[in-house]
Image: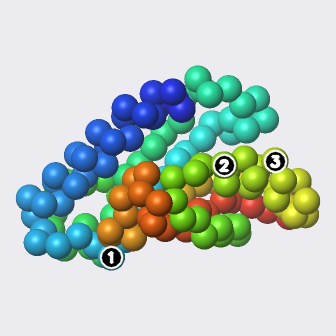
Amino acid sequence: MSLPESQIQIPALWGNLRRKLKQFFSNDPDFFYSVNVYPEDYFENFNPATPFTKYALVPAEYAGELDLGWETFSLPGGLYAVFNHKGPDISIFNYIYSQWLPQSGFMLDNRPHFEKLPADYIPGHPESAEEIYIPIRPV
């Protein structure tokens, strides 16, 4: 999906995951992962219309309880900058990429970016908190 398409596709992606979970489990996992895999030059040649891959994931130990035919996704190891964020204002991403990163002594690494979302996360809710993980490496 691209950023403009994400407004429609992300709710559908999460809705599909939640429906499937309710079919097999009586309760949600403690948290979810929202993972973005960007093309290698995505940030150097940023264009909102450039497609990337988005995943809505549950922890492997949770999904592994049943053979659901789901795919697995392994996050590659490495260093991540972690930012705690609360509420719907997404300007934190502008801060991370345009202010924090250039002054940090690190650069983006070409690995998945992800957010760790608590089970009670409600998109757009002012009290919804998440952890944002940005892959980095020393300059």
Residue at x 32%, y 68% (from the top left corner):
120
The kind of residue tagged 2 is: Ser
Residue 30 circle label: 1
The residues tagged by marks 2 and 1 sit, at their Cα atoms, a distance apart of: 26 Å
Residue at x 31%, y 49% (from the top left corner):
14
Report the residue marked by disc 2.
91
Report the residue marked by disc 3.
98
Looking at the rendered structure, the secondary structure element under dot 1 is: loop
Q: Residue 4: image x %, image y %?
A: 51, 27
Q: Quadrant of residue 102?
A: bottom right
Mark 3 or 2: the one toward you: 2
Q: Quadrant of residue 7?
A: top left
Looking at the rendered structure, the secondary structure element under dot 2 is: helix
Along the polypeptide, which appears first: circle 3 or circle 2?
Answer: 2
Mark 2 or 1: the one toward you: 2
The kind of residue tagged 3 is: Ser
Along the polypeptide, which appears first: circle 1 or circle 3?
Answer: 1
Q: Residue 73: image x %, image y %?
A: 41, 57
Looking at the rendered structure, the secondary structure element under dot 3 is: helix
Q: Residue 50: image x %, image y %?
A: 60, 26
Question: Do labels 2 and 1 touch, CB within 8 Å?
Answer: no
